[in-house]
Amino acid sequence: MALNLSGSSDGDSASGSVTLKGRFNINLGAALPTYDVAPAIAYRAELVSDKNRPLMALICDPQLPLRADKMLALRTLETRMLLKPHDWGVSDWPIENRRCPIVIVDRPLGSRVMPSLDARMRPMNEDLVARLLIRPAAEFLELIANQNLTHRAIRPDNVFYSDAEQTRMVLGDCISSPPAIAQPTVFETIESGMALPAGRGDGSSTNDLYSLGVTILSLLIGHVPMAEMTDEQVIEEKLTHGSYNALVGRERLSLTMMEVLRGLLNDDPKERWAVSDLMYWSHGRRQNPKPAAIPRKANRPFVFDGREYQTTRDLSNAFANNWDAAVTPIKDGSLNVWLRRGFSDEELIESVNEAMTDPLGIERTDDWLVSRVCIALDPNAPLRYRELKATVEGLGMLIGHYLDDEDMRDLFSKVMREQLHGFWQKNQRRLTESQEKFVAEYDRSRTNTDRIGLGLGIERVAYDLNPNLPCRSPILANDYVVETNGLLPALEHMAVSGVEFTSLVDRNMAAFLASKMASQVQADLRDLDNKVDPHVSLIASVKILSTVQDRVSKTEFVDLAGAVSTMLEPSVKRFHSRTVRKRVRDGLKKATRSGRLARLVEAINDPRDVAADASAFQQATAVYARTVMEDQRLEYEKTHREYFAREMGAQMSATVSGVITCIASVLIFVVMMFF
């Protein structure tokens, strides 16, 4: 859900205020569109204890995860080059009629350095750019690089003057949305630009340095370069000419600025300037950046889809953008012939041939084939599988973003099932520590991808790979819950608002909880998946929430307990004894007042009540069965009276006849013996 940006002019649209954590007041009538950082929108805020401190609140898109895990580290940085985040939380936001995540950051006293990315402005003086941006940015990037942090939102419209006199610049927010999700492709390296915005990942300082280079160039020439091109055209231009040549083109720059831009915009990460190189340059020590390596070209072009390609990287990009057409040249051998004739590189040919074979016994689909060949042709490119395109660091973030997209879920499942990340790893000459960590995480998560039980599946993988991902359960559609300690307060808020619950724990919430506290809820998740007895499933959901309350929240939730008690009424009726039902209802009422969900479970699922009721019911059933059978027998005899009369008469006649015969026989015997 994107935030409603309509009517966002200073001081418009609403009145009143919202309080965040009792520390910050946010003025609903004081929108600050000048400081919006897409997709977040800005409002004036004040610290309750210091109302003169210039602050603003960034109202974030509730469908996107914040970089909340970076908050503490960024807040404690000793720097003046960043609009520091002070705190964040979740609060009611009347304008959206829901609860939204809100980040409190410093409010600059000046304007944006560039009003918008579409703007054209007077080119900025080189000395001014060096003094206000390059030098302080170099110090800032060195500071965050030492803590393994990245900014990932460096672009001209996210750079501000920190004072009204425009004597200092400051970088804008970098935690209100996922890394690089709002970055135009032109500000991203070739590899990151190829990926979907949601799948770019945290990256490293080299990504920030590249973005800084494009930002510097934009200020020097007064506009964003290549702004009129599509994303794909930008990538093609960079691939064909190299980033520096594609971006700078024929712009007239001093040798000093050409030097820094050549260093920052080098397409080879190993040759791109590091933070230390930029620091040396900012202190007057001129560097001699190596020119970008010229891509190796084949002796003759490869014709694909009506165009000629002479480098494997260009061809890989073309295959990825015309997926179905790529199958034929791969399968008919023309690609292999071109590689053998055009390149004297047995390692490349072997890698492509390996991409076409399957040592793991995986089903060889056309998609599997194209994705692996694209990796072999360009190992530096992101993972690509039809519409799925993500860096290895961003693959997990991508599925978190597209968790409700069935097509993307299917593609992600195939990537994991076919272990595409493993083949990518095999084609890398060297992995960073971060990349190794992500590949290992994908290997661990792969087994859960196709499992269908509650607490498993793609939902579980998404939460495992995205600690900052809010719970995407429809139950929490109007709230924002990132940690388990926020779950019950959110449900309590719903109960207070009069929301009628139809369920308590669905598949998404089960995966969210399993990711956070698997060992504590695993047994109850199996009962939650019970499709035979709905009472077992309902009671299991209450037990799961009670576990969360006992282990995490440790607070009473009276309104939630009342709502749960109402939901448990059908489970009360499963008891057959009126006496037991009354005792259970009384127990639920008492438990509701306590606000403890565990007591509700004890009341509705007391083993003694369940056993006693079952035993009494069995006895009553047996007595009832005997009574019914006796009634049926008597009724039968009643309706067949004549038949029974004849039968009984015949029996009596036979009996009397037998008796008379016996008597006669005895008399005859006596007479014969004695007379």
Image (cartoon, rainbow, N blue to C red):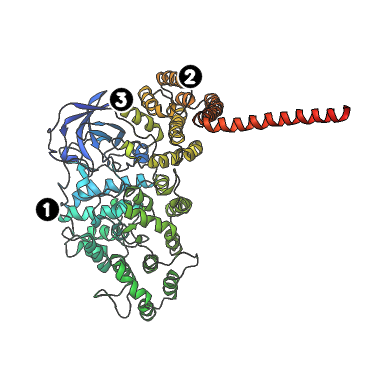
Q: Quadrant of residue 616?
A: top right
Q: Which mark is residue 139?
A: none
Q: Which mark is residue 120?
A: 1
Amino acid type assigned to the residue bearing label 2 in the image: Thr
Q: CA distance from mark 1 to mark 3?
A: 52 Å
Numbered-mark total = 3
The answer to whether residue 284 shows anywhere in this view is no
**Does 105 sit above or below residue 296?**
above
Question: Please, what secondary structure does the residue beneath circle 3 have?
Answer: helix
Question: Please, what secondary structure does the residue beneath circle 1 have?
Answer: loop
Amino acid type assigned to the residue bearing label 1 in the image: Arg
Q: Quadrant of residue 538?
A: top left
Nearer to us of marks 2 and 3 is 2
* Quadrant position of the C terminus in the picture: top right
Which residue lies under the disc numbered 2?
A: 579
Q: CA distance from mark 2 to mark 3?
A: 32 Å
Between 538 and 149, the residue placed more toward the observer is 538
Q: Is residue 385 left or right of residue 213?
A: right
Between 51 and 528, the residue placed more toward the observer is 528
Give the mark nearest the N terminus, 2 or 3: 3
Q: Tag 1: Cα neighbours inside 10 Å, few (<14), some, or many (≥20)?
A: some
